[in-house]
Amino acid sequence: MDDLISSRVKNITPSLTLAVTNQAKLMRSQGEEVYGLAGGEPDQDTPQFIIDAGVEALQSGKTKYTPSSGIPELREAIAEKLASENKISYTPQEIVVNAGAKHSCYNAIAAVIEEGDEVIIPAPYWVSYPEMVRLAGGVPIIVETTFENEWKMTPEQFEDAMSPKTKMLIINTPGNPTGSIYTEAELRGIGEIAAYEEIVILSDEIYENMVYGDNKHVSIASLSKELRDLTITVNGFSKAYSMTGWRLGYTAAPKPLADAIAKIQSHTTSNACTFAQYGALAALQNKEKSAAFMTDLVAEYDVRREFLFNRLSEIPNIKVTNPKGAFYFFVDTTEIGIKSQNLCDKLLNRYQVAAVPGIAFGHDYGVRLSFCTTLDVLAEGISRFDDFCRTH
């Protein structure tokens, strides 16, 4: 049967983040207490007004196909959002609504990358980027970043990683798994090189609203016309509106790229879920309700972030920075000396704590801990993690 499976698929690895989550669920179903610090989604429910809009759409017969790129009203609302919040001007025709930001990223990569093209990806990276590049026939070029530089790639590292085959750069800010945020100056430095070499930038901004303290999110496409014309901006509704299961993301790109993405989508999913698009439309149109929800969400996560950072700072044999965005800590476990998959297996099976191994993100001596859970779970989970670190 293996002979029937393409080599392209054989050469990719399943998502370790989903694998850890599934293992934790299995243990819970067998009656074991598991302290989940592996989650990648807000633990709050979708706001009721968005749910109501989805229900109303279903009840009013909005159950048929939509245009492949999304309903016009939603694309218009996304364009308005990008103009007012991100300072990037797009027409609705340059917006494509996809089945989640993960789908958006893959469509963008598939629209640009040809066999043998190289894609530069700073590590630690979101688990799916290299596999998406491989599925599209490309070659991921991994740039190792450091704890000392807050896990961010420098312009010099970017330039050193380039070759005549470089076609795309992937930037994720705020970042998963590190919570790092690239400043405007840092983005300008990287952007100047990309613009000079005419390298396409995939800017994954799904965590843009998860920003803490005085930090701010900057969209690289907003920095110049040259960068706007080279950038595919990816965003969605999963994190800010706690709509992970609704599966709605979008790309914003110059029209030739947007048309290519739409063409791929027309032959794969046809369109994103119809009634979910109306829920997303309500999220963008009800600005006051959405802002109130996000303000409360970020405030709650900031409390958890500070709690977890204070606890982690007391644990020996690890290094950690306080994330400026998203809802993860990436803990450097180099001093413990155990490879991340082995570490996380022991942590789960002996201490009942679910964490994601750093190898999933391209750094084998680290773990990702999420604070998408209650303070009670965080307190017990981090106490067990502390015990593990002190005994290994």
Image: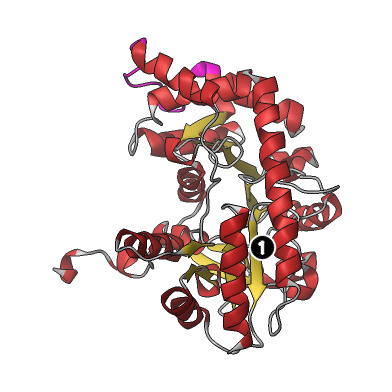
Residue 174 is situated, as x and y percent measured from the top left of the image, at 69, 52
The answer to whether 349 is drawn above or below residue 95 in the figure is below
> How dense is the environment of label 1, judged by Cα within 10 Å: few (below 14), some, or many (20 and up)?
many
Left or right position of 250 against 266: right
In the image shown, does 313 or 85 lie closer to the viewer? 313
Q: Could you say which quadrant of the image residue 332 lies in?
A: bottom right
The answer to whether 357 is drawn above or below residue 180 in the figure is below
Residue 76 in view here: yes
- Pointer 1 residue: 178
Residue 287: say if magenta.
Answer: no
Residue at horizontal 73 percent and vertical 27 percent from the top: 83
Q: Could you say which quadrant of the image residue 58 lies in?
A: top left
In the image shown, does 338 or 91 lie closer to the viewer? 338
Bounds of the magenta span?
A: 60-73
Residue 127 is situated, as x and y percent measured from the top left of the image, at 51, 62
Q: Looking at the picture, which amino acid does disc 1 mark?
A: Thr
User: In which quadrant of the rendered image does the C terminus lie?
Assistant: bottom right
In the image shown, does 62 or 36 lie closer to the viewer? 36
Q: Residue furthest left?
A: 1
Residue at horizontal 51 percent and vertical 17 percent from the top: 72
Residue 125 is situated, as x and y percent measured from the top left of the image, at 59, 63
Q: Residue furthest top?
A: 60
User: In which quadrant of the rendered image does the N terminus lie?
Assistant: bottom left
Magenta span: chief secondary structure: loop
- Secondary element at tag 1: loop
